[in-house]
Amino acid sequence: MKKRTWISIVMALVLATGCIAAAHAELLPAYGEGQIGLTGVVLCESLTVHQSASQGANVVKTLENGQMVIVMKQEDGWAQISISDDVNGGPLGWVKADYLAVDPAWFLTDSETHVYAWGSLQANKVALIEAGTRLPVLMQDGDWIVVGLRGAAGWICLGK
C-alpha cells in the first residue's frame, strides 16, 4: 500500500471517530449551590413564568434565552425560580424545568468556534460563535461537548 493512501486512511478514521482541531476555549465549572439556590439559564427562545406550577396558572412574566435565574426547588417537572434581582424579597414564579439548564458548566471561547449538528467534523456546521461567547454545557461525550444554542443544541470539538 502506498504511503499516501495509508495516510489518507488514517486521517479518515481520525475524522470519523474524533476531532483534530481543538476549540480555543475554557470550560468553566458549574457555580454550585449558592445561599438560596442553584443558578439556572433559560435554554429556549422565551419561557413563560407562572404564579404556580400549572400551565393554567396566571402568567407573571416571560424570560428570554440565556437569561439567568435562581432555582429554589424542582418538583413534578417544574422549577420554582426567583425572577427578581432582589432574591431575598423578590417574587417567585414557576417554569417548566425542561427549558432550563440548572447549574450547568460553561463553555467560554477565546476565538471563533464552529458548532456542528452532531459530534463529528463531517457533520453540518450549524453555527459560528464569536470569541468571548459563553454557552451552557448540556453534556460532554469524549472530545465533544453539547452546548445550548438559543432553543437548540450544538456540538463543539474540544480536540485532543
Image (cartoon, helix red, strand yellow):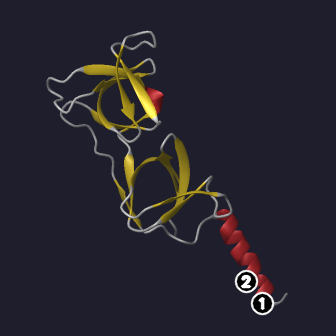
Q: Between 133 and 155, which is closer to the camera in this rendering?
A: 133
Image x and y of residue 27, in percent: 38, 58
Which residue is identified by label 2?
7
What amino acid is found at the position of numbered circle 2 in the picture?
Ile
**In the orientation shown, which residue stands out farthest toward the right?**
1
Which residue is identified by label 1?
3
Is residue 96 toward the left or the right of residue 144 in the image?
left
Query: Marks 2 and 1, how far apart in space?
Result: 6 Å
Vertical placement of 59 versus 115: above or below?
above
Is residue 5 toward the left or the right of residue 122 in the image?
right
Please, what secondary structure does the residue beneath circle 2 have?
Answer: helix
At label 2, counting other C-alpha atoms closer than 10 Å, the crowd grade (few under 14, some 14-19, many 20 or more) is: few
Vertical placement of 15 versus 140: above or below?
below
Q: Are marks 2 and 1 in contact (CB under 8 Å)?
A: yes
Image x and y of residue 121, in percent: 64, 64
Say which residue appears at 19% left-offset and 33% top-offset.
Answer: 85
On the image, which quarter does residue 7 sit in?
Answer: bottom right
Image x and y of residue 4, in percent: 77, 88
Say which residue appears at 55% left-offset and 54% top-offset.
Answer: 155
Vertical placement of 84 versus 20: above or below?
above
Image x and y of residue 81, in percent: 30, 26
**In the orientation shown, which residue stands out farthest toward the bottom?**
3
Q: Between 106 and 93, which is closer to the camera in this rendering?
A: 93
Say which residue appears at 61% left-offset and 56% top-offset.
Answer: 119
Is residue 35 toward the left or the right of residue 136 in the image?
left
Rendered-image quadrant of the N terminus:
bottom right
